[in-house]
Amino acid sequence: MAETTFREPAIALDRIYTRGGDAGRTMLVNGRRVRKDDPRVEAYGTVDELNACIGRARELAVRDSGKWSRLAALCAALLRVQHELFNLGSEVATDPEHLGERQPRILDSHVRCLEDEMDGLTAQLAPLQSFVLPGGSLLNAELHVCRTVCRRAERRVTALTEGGAAPGMPGRYLNRLSDALFVWGRWVCQCTGQAETLWRPNPAA
């Protein structure tokens, strides 16, 4: 499916509140009303949370790119991921049998793009001698926050997949994205010349 075959949003928001959710129910993309604690709502709500976290990390990367120009590539990648997460959210917020042919969704090409980026960056990094702790820079720590929220989103989406209620591509994408966020965190430390914080099981008192 070519990028241009997804339908564009047909949204006109002239008022934000509707009072429609006051009774604790909300509407899926295909119109079915469900409780706000429905597993599907929990899944796409966590994807939305992840998107917000990535937006915060991207703003840090934009700020730091004034000093370290190589971070501009990360800024672009994170913005692309935010768009892809909206596609993913559209898919997860729809009952599978009602997915439209041109509805935004995650494609195998999105997963492969993350893999290609990781391969290219990993080749630039020194092999790990231990696990790393979040930190070394504020941007690194924010990317680790994104990684952990991504893992939670993956668990929520997987719960739908296991029940036969969601296709597997969103789960594959989130699994790969969490790895990419880890690699980006390491790469950020290299770009900025800040040391990674390695896990030491027996630190000196």
Image: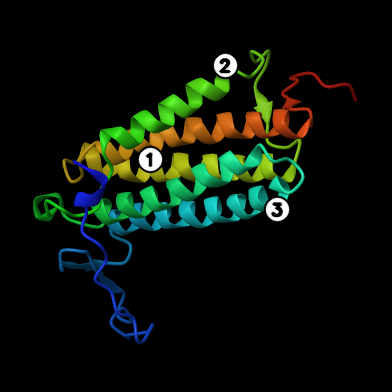
Contact between marks 2 and 1 (CB within 8 A): the answer is: no
* 3 or 1: mark nearer the eye: 3
Please state which amino acid type lies under the numbered disc 3.
Arg
Q: Which residue is mark 2?
A: 123
Residue 63 numbered tag: 3
In the image, which disc is placed on residue 54? none
Q: Earlier in the sequence, mark 2 or mark 1?
A: 2
Mark 2 vs mark 1, foreground winner is 2
The numbered mark at residue 155 is 1
Picture quadrant where residue 111 is located: top left
Is 4 placed left or right of 192 in the picture?
left
Q: Secondary structure at mark 2?
A: loop
79 sits left or right of 192 in the view: left
- Residue 183 spot, x, y in % from top left: 57, 29
Q: Residue 203, how many percent across, how many down?
A: 83, 22
Q: CA distance from mark 2 to mark 3?
A: 26 Å
Going 19% across and 50% down the picture, which residue do you hit? 5
Whether pointer 2 and pointer 3 mark residues with C-beta atoms closer than 8 Å, the reply is no
Crowd tier of the residue under label 1, counting other residues whose Cα lies within 10 Å: few below 14, some 14–19, many 20 or above:
some
The extreme right residue here reads 205
Locate residue 101 relative to residue 85 in the image: left or right.
left
